[in-house]
Amino acid sequence: MSSCIPLDKLHVKVDVAKNKTEDVPALHPRWSQKIQFVTYHAPPLDISDRGQCEEWADRLKFIEEDLHWALQLPHDKFWCQIVFDETFISLIDSYLRYAPRTHDILIELPVDTKSRHDEVHRLVFMTCLRMATHKESKEHHITPGVFGEILYENFLFDIPKLLDLCVLYGEGNGQLLYKMIDNIFTTQPKYNYDLQNTIPTILQVFDNIRAKCGVAEVSGLIPKKLTNPGQEQTELVTMMATDFQDVVFYLADTGTTLASFLDVYPPACSLFFKEDFVHHLAQLYESVIPQIVTSLKKRKFDSHSHKMLLRQKTQEAKNSLLKVVHLIINTCCIQPLLENIGGDERVEDFIHVFTSILNERRFLADFESRHRFENYQEILLQSPIEIDEMRLQYIQDAISSAFTTHGRRRKPTGGTNRGGRTSPDGSPGPMEDTGAVGTMGGATGGAVGGAIGGAMGGAPGGAVGGADFTAHADNFQVESYEMEGACAARKTGVELESLISSVKDLLPDLGEGFIEVCLEEMDYNIERVINSVLEDKLPPSLQDMDRNMPREVSQPGEAPKSLLDGRRNVYDNDEFDVFSRDSVDTSRIFHGKQNKMDKISLDDKTIGSEDKFRLNEAYGYVVETVTAEEASQYAKLYDDEYDDTYDTNNVGADDADSADELLHGRPLTVPRILGGGNQGRTQKSSESESQDSEDEKKQRDHFVQDPALLRQKAEQRRISQRRGQGRRFGQGQGREQGQEGQKYDVKGKAKGQGQDADVLKNRKFKEKNKASRGNHNRRYMSDKKRMGFGGGP
């Protein structure tokens, strides 16, 4: 029976004296052991200092051993050590305050030291998780009410610690942290009151940042002091480089811590919403972020890497603050509408929030670039509540106007067919730069937790407080917060199942397989998947799919699908396809040519006629036997190499021929396609015509004559032409000159002596008429002979 008693009611009998016992509570200081736990320190500033690195490594070794020992304690001993040992709590507080955040990575540390630090990081989380659990088993548990009092009265947990836990372990451990924080807030409702009182402290932190930047507090009751234009901007430009770096780091750590806490524990968003936190955050963003961006452009830095680091931290601060606003609006206004909770009240809250920040135009432009107002508007219009669309259109117009003036297009994260981001009204500026990833000069760990803990006052939890506003340098490296978009790795395992379950909670009628395909198509964006399904605006590739399609779950022992299953090739399933058959006939596979005839040369006189015939067959040369008659026919075929230079000359036209020779003029050849034959230029008697027709029937009609015969006839025509020219010249100009023929001098005298008029005339004539004697009309004459005109005599 005693084993089921809670620890707070359990008593243990102890021998005090001889034959005398005393009942001592199980949760008592006497059961705790006197051990001095070592506090955690930030990594050394100078990594090259071997002494500091060894000292820090030894400290990590002691912390690792102490935490291992504490976690192995039984339930009652562990709680006695936690409650009554202040050094143990100091160790947890120091680590939560000075440990590097999730967006900072240790670099340039030895491998063994870095692995030891990772182990300490894990042990601290396991210790905090055990501290937040009131029931470990049926035998070991604490009454919930008493458990809450133990946590609150001994300051085992407070709001600064919870904030630091979320920023340190929120990435990858969100579900465990949510259960842990929810258990703390459930067993001790006073933490809700502390969180509500913490919000004004956070707003005071915003005022401190604004004052550090030289920006006056925004208040409608106090008139703003008149200053010269640009005087407020000179504060950040002229301050020391270390102070400017502290402001940027402090603002980035503030935004990252708040975004991590609200992302892990969404119920806290309602408390921030009641305090009009969105309006104050928008004012901080509007007044500080542009000043910092302007100062980064004007200030001079020692190195380019330092400037890139501050740009990265500024971009990180912007993303975190915008994420905080999105989480508050989505949790307090949009999510209740999707769950049919609230109704008209949630719509009015949504409109009131955006109406109150319409004057913060730079904030609206940057918020629109990250979270489009159209997405919120579509969800509101799909709800069954009557909404004045004119009010929503007024807000949309104001946001579009602000975006047109101050906004920048966001780089698309995927292909254009997957819905890349576009601006509402376009943007005059270039695409927004997400900032270069550089080596971080330091981190202000626990800035928000320290400020809040110090401001709460009187609590031992203030040991966490007292803002450490000094940044540590050269120890960390910044990781970009931007998503990888279409280049991101495919999500699997627990992460994919979490996304599928999130969509299925809102749309239970959809199959898990269909949800998985939609998530993969839309870059694993839950909001886009839900909106596309509700609006029935799925991509064409998903419209014809079965919405009840289940997931393909591989059976235990089933071999995973190979990439060869989807292989498609023109050589699939042939005799040499090694992917479809186990054995291949290797005798049919050889390299190069294996024919023995390849080594035979045609110039070799020793080879026989049979080998030559086989060699000709192998290379496609077939020797055919041709008869004499066929050879004569081949010889009379058209030869393109025929010399047609003198075909157009009217040979013998100017000769003093006899009348008989004139009767035997050159016949006119008519193409066969026109039904013609050889027709004489002179009229013949009927007897000669019949004689010629009979001869033509007997003689075979060829398309062209023998080229050799044509060349012989052409040579005869040239000889007769020269003879005729001699006769003509002899008749007109004298015997001696006519014998040799007239010579046209085109050479003339030597250069520089001048030329006669006859030489110039002859040159001009030759230049003008050389086309009739040159080789320029070769194609024309070839076509002319092919059609049957201008043939030989």
Image (spheres, rainbow, N blue to C red):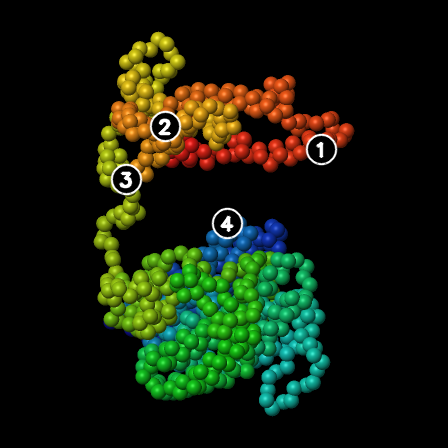
Disc with the residue nearer the chain's start (4 vs 3): 4
Up the image or down, 708 lies above or below 312; here it is above
**In terms of depth relative to the viewer, which is nearer, 63 or 229?**
229
382 on left or right of 725? left
Looking at the picture, how far across and down is residue 709, in whole percent?
40, 21
Q: Pointers 4 and 3 in contact (CB under 8 A)?
A: no
Report how far apart the C-alphas of labels 1 and 2 lie in the structure: 47 Å
Q: Of the residues shown, which amino acid type is indicated by label 4?
A: Val
Q: Of the residues shown, which amino acid type is indicated by label 2?
A: Val
Up the image or down, 129 lies above or below 696; here it is below
Q: Of the residues shown, which amino acid type is indicated by label 3?
A: Tyr
Report how far apart the C-alphas of labels 4 and 3 lie in the structure: 51 Å
307 on left or right of 73? right
**In terms of depth relative to the viewer, which is nearer, 12 or 191?**
191
Q: Residue at x 54, y 52 (%)?
A: 109
233 on left or right of 722? right
Task: State the residue position of label 4.
Answer: 111
Looking at the picture, how far across and down is residue 521, in whole percent?
35, 62
Q: Which mark is residue 102?
A: none
- Nearest to the eye among marks 2 and 4: give it: 2
Disc with the residue nearer the chain's start (3 vs 1): 3
Q: Which mark is residue 571?
A: 3
Is residue 323 in view? no
Q: Secondary structure at mark 3?
A: loop
Task: State the residue position of label 2.
Answer: 704
On-image quarter of the N terminus: bottom left
